[in-house]
Amino acid sequence: MMAELTINDFNAKERPQWCPGCGNFAIMGAIRGALLDLRIPPHQTVISSGIGCSSKMPHYVRTYGFEGLHGRTLPVASGIKLANHKLNVIAVGGDGDGYGIGMGHFQHIMRRNYDLTYIVHDNQIYGLTTGQASPTSQLGMKTKTTPYGVVETPFNPVASAILGGATFVSRVFAGDMAHMKGILMQAMAHRGFALVDVMQPCVTFNKLNTYEFFTKRCYKLDSEVKKHDPSDRLAAIEKALEPEKTNYERIPLGVFYKVDRPIYEDSLPQIKDKALVEHDISDVDISGAFKDMM
Ligand code: SF4
Ligand code: MG
């Protein structure tokens, strides 16, 4: 019988190389806590990542992991799902990583509705490369690449995911770890593509979107008198547009949208009942394919 899991089972040996105070620490803690509370042992989870400060995560949470290329966390995660859809697969990345170079993957993988959780450390800046404007940087924000302020309309990941086919769309704040852990647990338990966009302060390079900034402006959707209905797609889009409509004075947190739809893995007869890794390939001869390449 397996020993009772503890939080220590998810602690990796490597020490995080993040700046003191970075929001990434709380995200790491929330992932570990969610895995513990869901009783998913380390060997049943794979964390994939791209490139960026956030993408060091597979080194710091004791599960299987794959640190990939810039913007490619979702193709790696979906490949893992196709090889063994019985695993709990978490893709992590940053806003520059996933909403910049990885944008095409984001749009197409969420519309396929793979059963995976995508956590975006959305710090509204490129942190690892020392402070350039990212796709989610606010209008007017001064950065190394925008000395006169950002002039481009920021990408809205929550609205885009609701429209793009994600079946679970949420936003959390790295300054509220307990709430973040609860939403992560819901995202992992959801059967389908779950986006968790995290307002993650980059304390070194983003001097606008600080802990104080979010603490003043964030509120929880389920704390409102008139409760938000996450099955109402139009209401979800309305809520997703609230930050830009209010010039970031009101930033809703929680589950914006949730719907049940068949997952991609179930629509493939080859893996529907048996994971690809469980198939017997002892009588499969691929030598002919190699001959063609000689
Ligand atoms: Fe965190 Fe920013 Fe430091 Fe990267 S540069 S570790 S995002 S505070
Ligand atoms: Mg970033």
Image (spheres, helix red, strand yellow):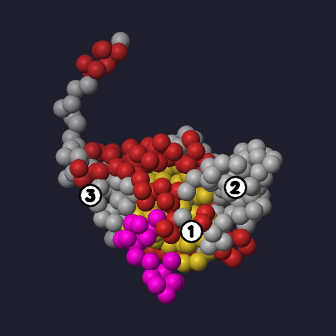
Q: Earlier in the sequence, mark 2 or mark 1?
A: 2
The outermost residue toward the top is 294
Q: Which residue is mark 3?
A: 262
Q: Earlier in the sequence, mark 1 or mark 3?
A: 1
Label 1 or label 3, whichever lies nearer to me, is 1
Q: Is residue 101 visible?
A: yes
Magenta-span inclusion, residue 231 = yes
Return the x and y of residue 24 as percentages of the image width and height. 64, 62
Q: Earlier in the sequence, mark 2 or mark 3?
A: 2
Mark 1 packing: few (<14 Cα in 10 Å), some, or many (20+)? Answer: some
Q: Is residue 56 visible?
A: no
Task: Name above or below for residue 127 compared with residue 245.
Answer: above
**Residues at marks 2 and 1, CA–CA distance in whole angstroms:** 15 Å
The outermost residue toward the front is 245
Identify residue type, mark 2. Answer: Leu
**Residues at marks 1 and 3, CA–CA distance in whole angstroms:** 30 Å
Mark 3 packing: few (<14 Cα in 10 Å), some, or many (20+)? Answer: some
Q: Which residue is mark 2?
A: 139
Is ligand 2 closer than 8 angstroms to the Cβ of mark 2? no
Please tell me whether mark 3 sits on a helix, a strand or a loop: loop
* Left or right, 121 with reference to 273: right
Mark 2 packing: few (<14 Cα in 10 Å), some, or many (20+)? Answer: some
Which region of the structure is painted magenta? Answer: 221-237
Q: Which residue is mark 1?
A: 242
Residue located at (41% from left, 64% from top): 168
Identify residue type, mark 1. Answer: Glu
Tell me which corner region of the image, top left, top right, bottom left or bottom right, holds residue 70.
top right
- State if disc 1 and disc 2 touch (CB < 8 Å): no
Tell me which corner region of the image, top left, top right, bottom left or bottom right, holds residue 245.
bottom right
Return the x and y of residue 162 as percentages of the image width and height. 43, 60
Please tell me whether mark 2 sits on a helix, a strand or a loop: loop
- State if disc 3 and disc 2 touch (CB < 8 Å): no
